[in-house]
Amino acid sequence: MPAADSLSAEKMAEMNKKQIYLVTGGCGFLGKHLVQMMLDQEPNLAEVRVFDLHVDESMRDLDRVALIQGDITNLEDVKAAVRGAHVVIHTASLVDVWGRVPPEKISAVNVGGTQNIIDACVSEGTQYLVYTSSMEVVGPNIKGDPFYRQNEDTKYEVLHKEPYPISKAKAEKLVIEANGRQMETGKHLVTCALRPTGIYGKNHPLMKEFYEQGLRTKKCMFRLIPASVEHGRVYVGNVAWMHLLVARKIQECPSVIGGQVYFCYDDSPYKSYEDFNMEFLRPCGFSLVGSRPLVPYFLLYLITLFNVFLQWLLKPFCTYAPILNPYTLAVASTTFTVKTDKAQRHFGYRPRYTWEESQGSTVKWLQEMEVQRQTGKNTPANVERRGNPKQKESSHGNQP
């Protein structure tokens, strides 16, 4: 790989010609936003290939978009999608921390699928790979150790037992270790990874689920977590923007970007999950009851253990996977916020959307959903449930 960052004439010519991007999981929550960002903001885009297990036919009419249906766990499917692409942005992932998806399926998609992407890039000569990782590669850990305004270099004890964060950590390791791997063309693979904090925005499946739950309690939400617990959240439009910027820069300065990981965040306020969600639900008439937790932590923990017992008991008959379990309680109860300028220094990232714009867009979506519900066009049965085993491999979303 080149030692200097100055652009050669060959590289300049390569970057200035029309390029083909491949987005895995391109029909998912993040994937759709990323595809639209490319169509709007990438002047040298010839085509964006959207690779997913279940394609969204509504995207077929988009100019310069090619829908490719395939299974990321099938190497031949992946090779066919990668062939001829200049850059791969790998967002496809099964996100499940509730036990809705078998652990072996999570590993097959998140780890095995990522290895297939790497192998396909090497064999097909696609030199640049950007991976959508997760903050959960780092934490919060299940011990409840706080991570307060820290960056990528902060020492933190990573301690996970759940299949999802373990799979994302393994996949990220594969991607970073593949940086510099010689390809069959003689060139070297260049890779990097972005770690979004909890993503939010229009069409986020988990926010839909919270909205539906609030309707069942007549728009009353009950505080369970202290307001002092803070989490970093990031708007999906800014996550898409960050991916596009690093995809450009990895081609310009491979020696700077290659092998790096970046937290993905913006200027959204640090708040507890409950208080942050109320920034969107309150304008829709929801209220949060209690200035302090209404249920003691030890009782919440006992409830999570009971949920685990019920899950085990009912496993032969049905899938019982409530949002509240020991892992999600630990995550929600542990401060985890990031504050770093690494992405700005390395590839000029600044949020494209302000907090006010991000909040306004999300509130507008929920209000539109409220209108649809009142007119009978949207019912709980129609709401997509994130993590369904039959759901497509899609992009990373936020945690409860």
Image (cartoon, rainbow, N blue to C red):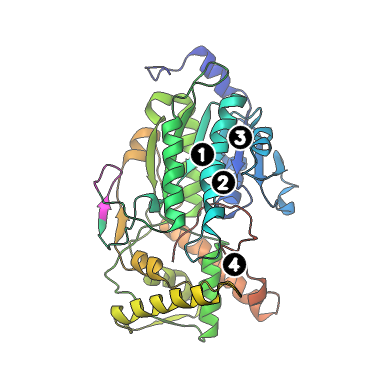
Residue at x-position 51% and y-position 33%: 129
Tell me the kind of residue under disc 2.
Answer: Leu
Question: Circle 1: is it few (<14), some (14-19), or many (20+) Cα within 10 Å?
Answer: many
Q: Which residue is mark 2?
A: 34
Q: Which one is earlier in the sequence, the residue at label 3 or at label 2?
A: 3
Q: Earlier in the sequence, mark 1 or mark 2?
A: 2
Give the residue type at disc 1.
Leu
Quadrant location of residue 399? bottom left
Q: Is there CB contact under 8 Å for labels 3 and 2? A: no
Q: Marks 1/3: CA distance?
A: 10 Å
Real-space CA distance between mark 4 and mark 3, rounded to the nearest whole angstrom: 29 Å
Determine the residue positioned at 39% across, 72% down. 274
- Going from N to C along the chain, the mark reached first, 1 or 3, is 3
Please give the range of residues in magenta.
148-155
Left or right: residue 68 versus residue 273 is right
Q: Position of residue 275 (x, y in %)?
A: 37, 71
Figure quadrant of the C terminus: bottom left
Q: From the viewer's perspective, is residue 231 above or below residue 166? A: below
First in sequence, mark 2 or 4: give its number: 2
> Where does residue 147 sit, x and y in percent of width and height?
26, 56
Please tell me whether mark 3 sits on a helix, a strand or a loop.
strand
Q: Quadrant of residue 4?
A: top left
Mark 1, residue position: 244
Q: Circle 3 is placed at which residue position?
A: 21
Q: Are marks 2 and 4 in contact (CB under 8 Å)?
A: no
Q: Percent position (x, y) of residue 51? A: 65, 43
Can residue 291 be seen at all in this image of the molecule?
no
**Mark 3 → mark 2, Cα distance in angstroms:** 11 Å
Question: What residue would you read off at disc 4?
Answer: 385
